[in-house]
Image (spheres, rainbow, N blue to C red):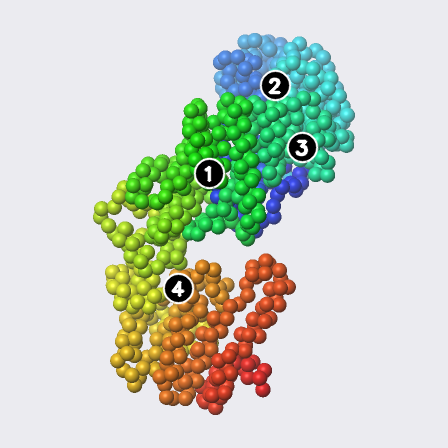
Amino acid sequence: MKWKIFLTVFISGLLCGLPQNIISCGPGIDPYDYYTSFFKQQPSTDGYRPFYYSNYVFLYDEAEPVSTEDELAKEWAAYCGAPVTAADAKLFVTGFDVKQLKNVYYHIEKKQPLTLPDSVNNNRMAGYFIRQKDLEGLGYILYARQVQPYVTGDYNNWEVLQRDTAKMSRLIKNGQQLYNVAKLDFYKLKYAYQLVRLAHYSQQYAAAVNFYDAFVSPNPTKSVLQPLAMSLKAGAMFRLGQHRQAAYYFSKAFSAAAVKRVSNYTSFKWCVSSQVARDEYLALCKDDTERADMLALFSLSSPFDETNTFTKILAMHPNAAVLDVLAVREINKLEEAYYTPLLNKQAGGRTLYYMWENGVADSALNAGKIRTHQLQQALQQAAVHGRDASKALFETGAAYCALMLKEYKQCHSLLNSAAQKSLPPEIKEQWMLINLLLSINETEKLDAGFEKQVLPSLQWLHQKAMQEKKSSPGSWYNTAAQWQQFYRNLVSEVLAKRYHQQGDTHKEVLAIGAADAIFVANDYEGYSNGVDFMRNNLQGEGVNKLYSLMSAKDNSAYDKFLLANNSIHLKQVIDFAGTAYLRDRNYAEAIKWFAKAGNTQTPIHKNPFIELLYDQEGQLPGKPISTTKLAFAKEMQRLEWQAGKDAANASAYYYKIALGLYNTSYYGYAWELVQYYRSGSDGYYLPDSSNTFKKEYYGCYTAYEYFKKAMDAAADVNFKAKCLFMMAKCGQKQLRRPQYDDFNYNWDNYEAAEKKYFIAFRNNPLFANLVKEYKHTPFFKEAYNSCSYLKDFVQANK
């Protein structure tokens, strides 16, 4: 929390502490973008922005929604009348030197010459005081400037403010005298507020409460000073040990005005105890409106389901403006708890935001479904009984709930009903987004006809995202770039999944690339989620379709839009197409594709046919042998042709092919020929949903077969020993290593499984054959002295 905000809370007489709803999270998470969302958190500029939903931060925005100085300046401008503006008032009251204000005062009172700089002389509020000779107002401003240093401090100062309580007591006495002689309630309220402040910050808490009750409460003047003084009274009551009463007054102050709303919220949180039922605090409220306001404050600080609370507030105070933000908070909670895991269970697409998620049980999804239905009903009630300005928001929210529940007919009905109401611009845009989601979800097939129909809506959403990007350049962490997120989520998690379901994997890849591009600053040559997704998920036929689409001259307007706003380029597709065929061992096709790339291939400085008894991924010392994917494909093609034609030397050809296959596996020396990135934490197990390539890349199955072919075709015993050893190496990779999440993150069970795995790993059955049949060969002795696993096996079986 920024020190300025801490100081604001401290001024209310309280300390900052850990919020009850904060969640401990790992590094790097974006608290504004960690679940799939399509519902905007800012339905209006209503002073509730700090309390929008995020379960990873105490406050969505730490800044106060409005400036106290600005609000008071407006009141001064209204009091002085035209042509005085709020800017004039703010500058005159808080910006000018006290000596200059005294100069104006003595000019009016004692006819002293007026010598002012142009900045003061041209200020229209200064002109008001000179014309009206309002000494009462000027006297108050001078008194307030005296008080100010004792009740505030420099927020850049990390030292606790030292207050001179003796001087503060003299100022209180002076303020009481000025209050008594003040003629207007407008000024009496201002003096009363200063008295409450001085008493509060000089730790005269009982006096602060008495000043409020005697001087502030009965004053009929409508001003932000009323809730500000009430907050001070609440803070004083907290210091006096009257925590529940303090919570009541902080609740009233919070609801009365947007000023100090963050401070009142935090202070309320400190006053209430999780061990005390809400009803005990609500019992202090005088009527349903006060009870609704307090329930709203409880709900704003809750990460749990508050649909029932929303319904209670609606019944007590249907015109409450806070119902808007409470409704959106509940929608966002369901997006996090229900809709996001529901989408994650669907195959295809890609989640491009950071999410800490271990999977959600079906029971939790069923509970989320019930909650979503309950919220839909509550929002439909609010659309009937709530305030007119919010009815469209509530009904649009209900339509979104129906969409999450896949009740598309109901979603249509609610959207049509909402459209009959007067839709404010921001709700109209939300309506359009939900309608776009509905169109994509309910259509049976995303064919050319549908793509033509949906294109204008997709272009509109992209334009909204790009406008937001230009207005907030570099926005990512600590900024809610919601339209960018909505566009990304729609194309990567809705559109892409639909393409995946109907087998159009090339369109799925383009959707991922389109989602990625919205956050990339026109630099598609660097890392791209879209390109990465293509390389890890697309195979032969899909690559051909993608290339054909990207190289076509007569694409549809929809395809042109998708291609123009994408992070995937044609040359990347060409390189990957060749690589995909290289993975499939279709060397003829790989050569054709690599030939299209011309001389743009990046060489790797490793020998893909090197013979290593121990796995080595990093480049070995010495002069490297350089190769390219094209050269490797040509050599592998030649070896296969020679093995079929030259039976006498077939074993040597098979062995070299096997080396090429093993060295382009995860464990191999030249893995870069078939993969673009290698994680040091993979290996010794097949990832879930592995395709044919990944099974080979992690399991070395075909390499094993070619080493076996080489052994079977060979006559030399020493060479056979070498082939069998390499088969044993491949076999070790096919023994699945336990993963921590296999045991629901139970360390003891995981550790026990690891021990069993390593026993099986060392007891490779092919080692037994190697010892039995080839123990006396030169190669065996070399392998025994190089491979610790072989040595462990031999010693354990003596």
First in sequence, mark 2 or 1: give its number: 2
Instruction: Report crowding for label 1: few under 14, some 14 to 19, many 20 or more residues within 10 A (C-alpha).
Output: some
Task: From the top left corner, tell me how far across and down residue 313 is, in percent.
Answer: 61, 27
345 or 233, which lies in front? 345
**Which residue position holds label 2?**
223
Which one is closest to the eye, mark 4 or mark 2? Answer: 4
**Which residue position holds label 4?**
692
What's the CA distance linking mark 4 and mark 2? 72 Å
Q: Are marks 2 and 1 in contact (CB under 8 Å)?
A: no
Image point (31%, 45%), residue name: 447
Give the numbered dot on residue 268: 3
What's the CA distance linking mark 3 and mark 2? 22 Å
Give the numbered dot on residue 407: 1
Image point (73%, 31%), residue name: 280
Which of the 4 quarters of the picture holds residue 106? top right
Identify the amino acid type marked 2: Ser
